[in-house]
Image (tube, rainbow, N blue to C red):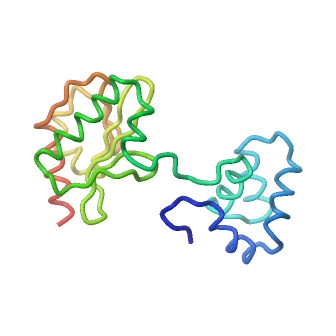
């Protein structure tokens, strides 16, 4: 099992144990695929050799010169990659919530900034070219706030806001409160 550091080589002993042969053999087999794209490499390992998605991904991404799954060590590293307007909005979103709930910790998980408490996630954010996507980690929370979210594009567990969103602290804090109530 891997640790929290994102080191893909931590999968190697399990791959060798489950699939046999040294890792160098599997690296050579992927090299033999030439310029195959990621999906073809994954499919090759899964369909021809019975690899799990996690093992195939670890090996393929290592071959593709991505030895770690961690792109960002801190939320500030994440924010630094955003357009300045989006970065300001993202900062303001988290500040609006943490001003009311200072016990929440801003962390990076799945390469995205998220607020959590006691290891449980309260709200997360991801950035796209034209919007920010907010995730309160609960379909029930989104349903509770359906009326307030009527002007937003709402998906199964997320909702979109523009990059230059005027942060609705009342909405965000209400959602955070509802999510925190679920976690008790």
Quadrant of residue 146 within the rendered picture: top left
* Vertical arrangement, residue 177 with respect to residue 77, above or below: below
Could you tell me residue 60's position as x and y percent? 71, 52
Quadrant of residue 167 within the rendered picture: top left
Q: Quadrant of the C terminus?
A: bottom left
Q: Quadrant of the N terminus?
A: bottom right
Could you tell me residue 132's position as x and y percent? 35, 32
* Vertical arrangement, residue 156 with respect to residue 67, above or below: above
Q: Determine the residue positioned at 71% across, 58% down.
A: 59
Q: Determine the residue positioned at 82% across, 39% down.
A: 35
Q: Is residue 153 left or right of residue 83?
A: left
Q: Is residue 50 left or right of residue 5?
A: right
Residue sitting farthest toward the right: 32
* Vertical arrangement, residue 36 with respect to residue 122, above or below: above
Could you tell me residue 161's position as x and y percent? 29, 29
Could you tell me residue 113's position as x and y percent? 36, 46
Q: Determine the residue positioned at 51% across, 67% down.
A: 3
Quadrant of residue 8 within the rendered picture: bottom right
């Amino acid at each position: 099992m891997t640790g929290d550091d994102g080191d893909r080589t931590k999968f190697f002993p399990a791959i060798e144990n489950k699939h046999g042969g040294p890792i160098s053999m599997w690296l050579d087999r992927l090299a033999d695929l030439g310029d195959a794209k990621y999906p073809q490499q994954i499919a090759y390992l899964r369909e021809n050799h019975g690899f799990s998605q996690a093992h195939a991904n670890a090996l393929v991404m290592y071959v593709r010169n991505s030895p770690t799954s961690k792109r960002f060590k801190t939320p500030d590293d994440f924010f630094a990659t955003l357009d300045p307007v989006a970065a300001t909005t993202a900062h303001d979103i988290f500040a609006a919530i943490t001003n009311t709930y200072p016990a929440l910790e801003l962390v990076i998980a799945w390469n995205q900034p998220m607020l959590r408490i006691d290891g449980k996630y309260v709200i997360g954010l991801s950035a796209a070219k034209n919007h920010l996507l907010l995730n309160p980690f609960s379909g029930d929370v989104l349903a509770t706030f359906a009326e307030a979210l009527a002007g937003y594009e709402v998906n199964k567990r997320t909702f979109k806001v523009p990059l230059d969103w005027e942060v609705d602290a009342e909405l965000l804090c209400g959602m955070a409160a509802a999510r925190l109530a679920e976690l008790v």
